Image: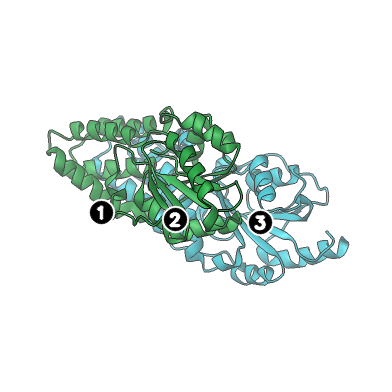
Chain colours: A cyan, B green
Amino acid sequence: MSSRELAIGFDADDTLWHNETIFEDVHARYREMLSRYHDADTVEATLYETEMRNLDLYGYGVKGFTLSAIETAIQLTDGKISADEIRQLMALGRDMLAHPVELLPGVAETIEALASKHRLLLITKGDLRHQERKLLKSGIAEHFRHVEIVSEKNESTYAAILRRHVINPARFLMVGNSLKSDIFPVLAIGGTAVHLPYHLTWKHELTDTIPLENGRFFTLEGVRDLPPLLETLLARA
Amino acid sequence: MSSRELAIGFDADDTLWHNETIFEDVHARYREMLSRYHDADTVEATLYETEMRNLDLYGYGVKGFTLSAIETAIQLTDGKISADEIRQLMALGRDMLAHPVELLPGVAETIEALASKHRLLLITKGDLRHQERKLLKSGIAEHFRHVEIVSEKNESTYAAILRRHVINPARFLMVGNSLKSDIFPVLAIGGTAVHLPYHLTWKHELTDTIPLENGRFFTLEGVRDLPPLLETLLARA
């Protein structure tokens, strides 16, 4: 890294703003709704199974989750769930879509400070309209030079994004909470990756592997630790 | 238009491949399912109302349609719809997502021929994953230099796309079946627009206004008429 400007990609959900907490809350209400029929573990396992079966068709996001939750509820109750309860499920889905965006600590000031020195990209997967709405409500949209909402975050997605914006992987750094979506694919294409663990991780994003310490992977406690790390990296280059 | 290369944007649904016919078929089955409760007109009007109420939150696409169809069915049957019928509605939604892609007449050969001379873009709105899957299944994906899946097709979307790809509006031509989404916004930002009417149009995309004949708007019967039109335009320039 020779000049002073880097291209920094940020994941959105659970990196810039809370997301999994909202899902957790909905899961709790869902288990409660079905508790007359099944224990919590069965409800969770069956819902996850349905989500995975539908993932290729539905993709990520709240609408697919809502449809899978309805499907699972009908299955687990042998069709005894009432239309009113299904209506409640759909209302939960709409509440999630309309939920206020709560930035994580330090995000607003750190993103603003970094945007004056570096080229920031938002790289997130999920529902197009929902992610756009959240970014708009976040109050930090103006700091991102490019916004990329993709259907899956893997090596070829990242490679295509860097190609499109003419970014050298050696000058690209990705920041996110998911080892699977934000860290591994970026390391694989020669970029630098900064893991910001969130206190909750969706099962689908979990991984047992720990990335190798190769000078291109870092774990930080919060986004406020990012500017000092960048200083170190740039000084070292 | 001075050089020989143009940037040509293509809408996807009902321009390159059939889409509204699939929705029509599902609508017919939906009306049939609710015919014990209400006449066809009431069913259609209420479903459309629900879709419009949810549009800002759900955006375009099959998943949002399915959720709106379930919501409307519960409402129109006063909650008397059975869980099994709701399951059938969800299966209809999944069938739509998994439906084979049927290209319109002349699309395969025309797109291939145009791609050798011009820079082709696919510009479509709707569900990210679903549109990507359809393009993949279409067999013509390789001919598009850029693929833009957006949440709404308006003046600012088109302006952003042209800016991103450094395309001069005077050298941009958009081809599509919707006056509202493919024609008006493109004419407004100084581009050329070619209307390819499809035999069905979703109510939301209908408009009463007819664009002005100003030398930048054309209506063709089918995509096969596009290469001759381009020759005329380029000769005239």
Helix, strand or loop under label 1 = loop
Are the residues under badges 1 and 3 in a single subunit?
no
The mark that comes first in sequence, 1 or 2, is 2
Front residue of B90 and B96: B96
- Place of residue A75 in the rendered image (x, y in percent of width and height, measured from the top left): 35, 31
User: Vertical placement of A15 versus A57: above or below?
Assistant: below
Between disc 1 and disc 3, the foreground one is 1
- Asked where in the image residue A100 lies, by quadrant, the reply is bottom left
User: Vertical placement of A109 versus A208: above or below?
Assistant: below
To which residue does mark 2 refer?
Answer: B186
Helix, strand or loop under label 3 = strand
Who's the residue at 77% across and 46% down the image?
A190
Q: Residues within 10 Å of mark 3 (few under 14, many from 20)?
A: many
Q: Amino acid at mark 3?
A: Gly
Q: Amino acid at mark 1?
A: Asp
Q: Amino acid at mark 2?
A: Val
> Subunit of mark 3?
A
Q: Residues within 10 Å of mark 1 (few under 14, many from 20)?
A: few
- Tell whether A109 sits left or right of A19: right
To which residue does mark 3 refer?
Answer: A9
Which disc is residue A84 wearing? none
Front residue of A33 and A205: A205
Label 1 to label 2, Cα distance in Å? 18 Å
Between disc 2 and disc 3, the foreground one is 2
- Tell whether B64 sits left or right of B35: right
To which residue does mark 1 refer?
Answer: B208
Who's the residue at 38% across and 38% down the image?
B14
Who's the residue at 24% across and 45% down the image?
B47
> Subunit of mark 1?
B
Q: Residues within 10 Å of mark 2 (few under 14, many from 20)?
A: many
Front residue of B99 and A208: B99
